[in-house]
Amino acid sequence: MLAKSAWLMDQGRHSIERAFAARAQACETAMRVTADMMLLHGGFGVTREYAVEKYYRDAAPLQIMDGSVDRIAVVAAERL
């Protein structure tokens, strides 16, 4: 979805709804994957010794940057 949205923008046929949907999906996926990584690593997943903790810290702000993912999904749905 993200690649399709970027390709459409390159072609000059960008769609804000597609971009919002791609961003929401990417943010949700990043949070789900990093949370699963932390669970998989157990106690080591929260230590700064391993990169897992940093990935989680990097993914968390994506949920609220430029508006929450839930709000972005609502805006995208309203425009469809």
Image (spheres, rainbow, N blue to C red):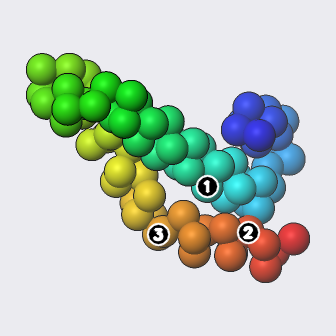
Kind of residue sitting beneath label 3 = Gly
- The picture places residue 80, in percent across and down from the top left corner, at 87, 71
Tag of residue 67: 3
Instruction: Name the residue carrying label 2.
Output: 76
Which of the two marks, 3 or 1, is nearer to us in this view? 1
Q: Are marks 3 and 1 in contact (CB under 8 Å)?
A: no
Kind of residue sitting beneath label 1 = Ala
The residue that appears at 57% across and 74% down in the rendered structure is 71
Residue 55 visible from this viewpoint:
no
The earlier-in-sequence mark between 2 and 3 is 3
Residue 25 visible from this viewpoint:
yes
- The picture places residue 6, in percent across and down from the top left corner, at 72, 36
Q: Secondary structure at mark 1?
A: helix
| In this picture, residue 70 sits left or right of residue 58 | right
Pick the residue in front: 6 or 45.
45
Q: Are marks 2 and 3 in contact (CB under 8 Å)?
A: no
Q: Quadrant of the N terminus?
A: top right
Q: Quadrant of residue 69?
A: bottom right
- The picture places residue 65, in percent across and down from the top left corner, at 40, 60
Q: Secondary structure at mark 2?
A: helix
Label 3: few (<14), some (14–19) or many (≥20) C-alpha neighbours in 10 Å: few
- The picture places residue 68, in percent across and down from the top left corner, at 48, 68
Label 1: few (<14), some (14–19) or many (≥20) C-alpha neighbours in 10 Å: many
Q: Secondary structure at mark 3?
A: loop
Instruction: Name the residue carrying label 1.
Output: 24
Q: Are marks 1 and 2 in contact (CB under 8 Å)?
A: yes
Q: Is residue 2 above or below residue 64?
A: above
Q: How far apart in space, not on screen, are marks 1 and 2 (Cα)?
A: 9 Å
